[in-house]
């Protein structure tokens, strides 16, 4: 049985290692090679393991530039794991048996973008799900699925770790069956299908009028390997690295106001409840009584006053 792999992140590396471990014939690996790897969450260079195992390797920036190369492989299975690019139908149709994708949710629930961030934010259990690729994203029949739980204390990093652990189990169950010629994909039930929308780095902005619970979920969902949650203090952007709601202290303050400070940990009043946040070290000058975020109406008023003063100065200098 001949297989090929397209990928370039941690889940791709796990898949490649398992394909090697279970002694499938790997004809080729296409590894994502972006200009800036720091912009790719969980990036992994697959070239070293391919070199060590004498597996043919091709780097790519756009996988659809390699359609003819992939079609020429004539593999039985093509694994497409860990890339966000839309894959051309000719690539999906190229393997003799099927192209297998991966998604870290309990499909048909949670199709779509930024699944790990959404699982953390919604405290929703996930699954290492391998499924048949179709033109519609994440909608193909399920080949293997290994559940994992998501708890309130989980962060993006811990859920990613749980995802990879579940992948090991799913692949250990699936690959021997594929080698034995067992192939029984199960169609997804569309009645239970849900979808997650895209998330951008700017979605990590903390709105202090939200509840402590909602802010805590946002911080955990936005944490590494994602770009991170943030707020503003005066004219600087402040990264928020960790958070924990405070349920014991009986303090009431103005929303966004710092009520206590200990090194880089601040206690802040939210729209409903208190929250401790750990901020980036460069923002350690923030003190008790100072306010995070912007007061839009106040900022607009001050900006208008500055514009009026500037206008007066310009008129005087004519």
Image (cartoon, grey):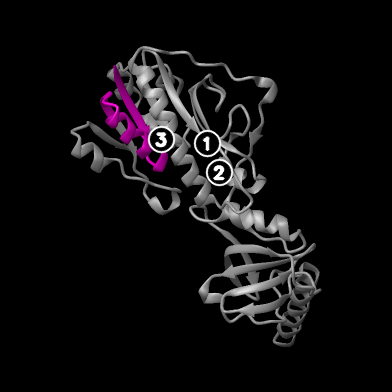
User: CA–CA distance between discs 3 and 1?
Assistant: 13 Å
Q: Left or right of 72: which side holds 168?
A: right
The vertical placement of 206 against 159, above or below, is below
In this view of the protein, which residue sits in the foreground, 124 or 230?
124
Residue 287: x percent and y percent? 65, 82
Q: Is residue 7 magenta?
A: yes
Q: Left or right of 308: which side holds 81?
A: left
Q: Earlier in the sequence, mark 3 or mark 1?
A: 1
Residue located 31% across and 22% down the image: 3
Residue 255: x percent and y percent? 78, 69
Q: Residues within 10 Å of mark 1 (few under 14, many from 20)?
A: many
Do callouts 3 and 2 mark residues in contact (Cβ within 8 Å)?
Answer: no
Residue 116, disc: 2
- Quadrant in the picture for residue 11: top left
Do callouts 2 and 1 mark residues in contact (Cβ within 8 Å)?
Answer: yes
User: What is the quadrant of the C terminus in the image?
Assistant: bottom right
Q: Could you tell me which secondary element the residue under label 2 belongs to? A: helix
Residue located 67% across and 61% down the image: 206
Q: Could you tell me which secondary element the residue under label 3 belongs to? A: helix
Q: Is any atom of residue 87 visible in this view?
A: no
User: CA–CA distance between discs 2 and 1?
Assistant: 7 Å
Residue carrying label 3 = 168
Q: Earlier in the sequence, mark 2 or mark 1?
A: 1
Residue 26: x percent and y percent? 27, 26
Mark 3 against mark 2, which lies toward the viewer? 3
Point out the stretch of residues depicted in magenta: 1-28
Q: Earlier in the sequence, mark 3 or mark 2?
A: 2
User: CA–CA distance between discs 3 and 2?
Assistant: 17 Å
Q: Could you tell me which secondary element the residue under label 1 belongs to? A: loop
Which residue reaches farthest front? 248
């Amino acid at each position: 049985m001949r297989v090929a792999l397209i990928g370039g992140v941690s889940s791709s590396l796990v898949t490649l290692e398992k394909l090697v471990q279970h002694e499938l014939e790997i004809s080729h690996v296409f590894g994502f090679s972006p200009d800036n790897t720091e912009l790719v969450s969980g990036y992994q260079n697959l070239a070293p393991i391919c070199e060590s195992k004498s597996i043919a390797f091709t780097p790519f920036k756009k996988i659809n530039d390699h359609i003819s190369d992939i079609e020429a492989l004539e593999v039985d299975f093509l694994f497409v794991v860990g890339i966000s690019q839309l894959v051309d139908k000719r690539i999906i149709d190229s393997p003799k048996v099927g192209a297998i994708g991966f998604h870290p949710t309990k499909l048909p629930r949670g199709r779509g973008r930024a699944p790990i961030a959404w699982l953390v934010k919604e405290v929703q259990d996930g699954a290492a799900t391998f499924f048949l690729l179709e033109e519609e994203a994440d909608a193909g029949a399920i080949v293997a699925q290994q559940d994992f739980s998501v708890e309130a204390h989980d962060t993006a990093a811990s859920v990613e770790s749980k995802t990879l652990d579940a992948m090991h189990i799913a692949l250990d169950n699936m690959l021997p069956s594929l080698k034995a010629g067992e192939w029984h994909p199960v169609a997804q039930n569309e009645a239970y299908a849900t979808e997650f929308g895209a998330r951008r780095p700017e979605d990590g902005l903390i709105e202090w009028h939200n509840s402590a619970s909602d802010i805590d979920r946002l911080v955990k969902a936005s944490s590494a390997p994602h770009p991170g949650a943030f707020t503003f203090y005066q004219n600087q952007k402040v990264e928020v690295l960790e958070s924990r709601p405070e349920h014991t202290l009986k303090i009431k303050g103005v929303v966004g106001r710092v009520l206590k400070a200990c090194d880089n940990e601040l206690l802040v009043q939210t729209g409903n409840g208190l929250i401790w946040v750990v901020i980036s070290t460069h923002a350690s000058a923030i003190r008790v009584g100072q306010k995070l975020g912007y007061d839009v109406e106040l900022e607009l008023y001050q900006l208008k006053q500055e514009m009026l003063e500037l206008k007066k100065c310009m008129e005087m200098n004519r």
